[in-house]
Amino acid sequence: MSLKTQRVNDANAIASSTISAELVDKKSQAITQQFAKNVNIHGFRKGKAPVSIVKQRYAKQIQQEVEQEAVRESFQQALKDLKIEQKDVLGNPAITKFERKGEEIDVEFKISLAPKVDLSKLKSCVPEVKVKEPSLKEIDERLDEIAKSQTPLVEAKATAKLAEGDTANIDFEGFIGDKAFEGGKAEGFDLLIGSKQFIAGFEDQLIGMKKGEEKDIKVTFPQDYQAKDLAGKEATFKIKLNAIKVKGESKLDDEFAKKILNQADATLQTLKDQIKLQLQNEARVKLYNEELKPKLVDNILETIKFDLPDLIVEQEMNILLNNYARTLTQEEFEKFQNDSKAIEEKRKELESEAQKSVRITFIVDSASKEYGVQVQDNEVIQALYYEAMMAGQNPKATLEFYQKQNLLPAVKMAMLEDRILTMLLDEKNNTSSASKGSEKAEKPKTTKATKEPKEGEEKPKKAPAKKTTAKKEDK
């Protein structure tokens, strides 16, 4: 066997080998003998069939095994020649040439190797972290939201008129023409005006009604309404307003704080401190996800350079190409599929993105080992279940889809990446906070002439956190 090898760079190597006719024949004889011991041929006892008959009967299978073993030996010899350990090899080699010349075999293959990733500059890539302190106004607004959510509904005065934000206790029955339809009737139903829980126009026509008042309203069901027999039809609803309910008043004191925090020694100030921490965390998460994590990834890709294994980059390009193909219409896909030039151009276009993806994956993998950061399999499953439930999907079916498509490793790597980026940013944030704390401790006491502004005065105003909107349920 003649062998030539070349170490292209830290992550790639190539090898070529000519397997002699003598070696091919030797392997063929050995594998044929092995076949003869194990196969059953009619008219002969197991293992007693003549070698010539075995060779004739199983010629194709024997040839395949000869070729596979020859290539395997060439590969192992190439690793030895290149002084590469098996543990550093990524996947199987890519055979770029396999040619029989008489009884000889010429074979060439590419080998991808785990790159060497230097993380010494990783922490220098972390951008400055400045999480804004919540203002007193924001804390009070969140406290007011909590109070409203905990305040029970009380019946409004008899003279009150129904307004947006009130809860209407109603009896109703729906008709198409003169005929009542199934599912269109309820008694004592509490409807929050402005929630858009019912179909468009329903709630708006109730505004201004008084307790005990009865009214007929007309609405039109949407064309895509789930009940096909009602879709697009005009309906009349007979309404009776039984009561108007409004939020009562909550007394914001220590007793309220004890109830919310479920702590016997809690005070209103304790609750405000907890709200402040919650707002800080929300601001931190938003800052990380919307601004700092993308910037950190860009910095990492710009700073940490190393050779990439070509075969892994090509695999990623194929994944991206398949993802692109899934976005096409059937007509576009068929046209794209039959245009080899367009496919190659698209692959080339995706190469840079694939390289970035592979680079960050190796950096994340190295960082996870360096810092002992892990994501367990059960965490991946829990994350998928949560996302599915939040999207109103079947969690079990979602998990099965990800398993069948072999997408769980990609989800796990994405979670690991997010965890490491968060760790790096948190570390920078904690260092900055400690530094600020130290500076504050060294400041001299302020005099009237140098009085510092009160907390919250210099802070930019921030809208209160949005509430989660309940899922719309048409009636």
Image (cartoon, rainbow, N blue to C red):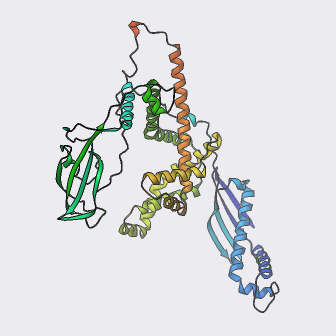
User: Of 231 and 280, which appears nearest the observer?
Assistant: 231
Compare residues 422 and 262 and report the one nearer the observer. Answer: 262
Q: Position of residue 100 (x, y in %)?
A: 66, 75
Q: Residue furthest right?
A: 48
Residue plotted at (64% across, 51% down): 114
Q: Residue furthest bottom?
A: 43
Evaluate whether residue 180 shows in this view. Answer: yes
Q: Residue at x 34, y 28 (%)?
A: 461
469 relative position to 84: left or right:
left
168 shown above or below 331: above
Number of marks in picture: 0
For the N terminus, the image quarter is bottom right
> Where is residue 388 drawn, in percent x and y?
46, 54
Quarter occupied by the C terminus: bottom left
The reply to whether residue 352 is in sight is no
Percent from the top left, x then y, of residue 229? 26, 67
For residue 296, above or below residue 242: above
Is 122 left, or right, of 257 in this rendering? right
Viewer-closest of 145 and 139: 145
Residue at the spot x=25%, y=62% of the render?
A: 223
